[in-house]
Image (tube, rainbow, N blue to C red):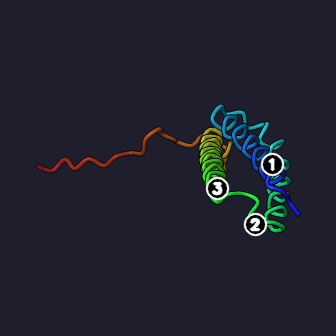
């Protein structure tokens, strides 16, 4: 049977990893996130097993606090993923515009590319 002390030790280890991951995300240190992923998964599975054996090992308030930390971490990860996707899309756009496909047409002649499209002005009065 899982004791309260064992379950709390797992929760504390998971909280430490989550705090480290949040700090890394806020600092933009994405390289270390890979290291935290497996440890988070291992600790999460371990906690799940301990709570399945003894659901009363940890107070509900402590689990709610852990849930809040997990949600905060997930939000940071989502924001990082969204920002990364936007950067990739922008780089692709710039590459396409300034690469060979964007400057030269099929005939090999330079395309007439303006930074802004031509604007039709109504000159009637």
Q: CA distance from mark 2 to mark 3?
A: 16 Å
Q: Nearer the viewer, mark 2 or mark 3?
A: 2
> Which residue is rendered at x = 26% and y = 47% of the image?
121
Residue 6 x/y as whole percent? 84, 52
Q: Earlier in the sequence, mark 3 or mark 1?
A: 1
Q: Is residue 49 visible?
A: yes
Could you classify mark 1 by the number of other residues whose Cα lies within 10 Å: few (under 14), some (14-19), or many (20 or more)? few
Which residue is nearer to you in this view: 42 or 8? Answer: 8
Residue 49 x/y as whole percent? 84, 64
Q: CA distance from mark 3 to mark 1?
A: 17 Å
Q: CA distance from mark 2 to mark 1?
A: 25 Å
Label 3's element?
helix
Q: Which mark is residue 37?
A: 1
Query: Which residue ends up furthest to the left in the rendered image?
Result: 125
Circle 2/circle 1 CB separation < 8 Å: no
Q: Earlier in the sequence, mark 2 or mark 1?
A: 1
Image quarter in which the N terminus is found: bottom right
Q: Nearer the viewer, mark 3 or mark 1?
A: 3
Which residue is the site of mark 3? 67
Which residue is nearer to you in this view: 107 or 68? Answer: 68
Residue 116 x/y as whole percent? 43, 41
Q: Earlier in the sequence, mark 2 or mark 3?
A: 2
> Which residue is rendered at x = 62% and y = 51% of the image?
65
Which residue is nearer to you in this view: 97 or 19? Answer: 19
Q: Which mark is residue 55?
A: 2
Label 1's element?
helix
> Which residue is rendered at x = 79% and y = 54% of the image?
4
Label 2's element?
helix
Could you classify mark 3 by the number of other residues whose Cα lies within 10 Å: few (under 14), some (14-19), or many (20 or more)? few
């Amino acid at each position: 049977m899982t004791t309260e002390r064992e379950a709390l030790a797992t929760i504390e280890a998971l909280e430490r990893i989550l705090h480290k991951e949040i700090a890394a995300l806020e600092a933009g240190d994405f390289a270390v996130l890979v290291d935290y992923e497996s440890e988070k998964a291992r600790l999460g599975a371990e906690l799940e097993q301990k709570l399945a054996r003894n659901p009363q090992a940890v107070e509900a308030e402590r689990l709610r606090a852990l849930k809040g930390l997990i949600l905060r971490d997930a939000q940071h990860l989502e924001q990082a993923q969204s920002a990364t996707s936007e950067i990739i899309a922008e780089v692709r756009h710039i590459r396409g515009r300034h690469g060979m496909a964007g400057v030269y047409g099929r005939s090999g002649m330079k395309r007439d590319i303006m930074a802004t499209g031509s604007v039709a002005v109504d000159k009637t009065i």
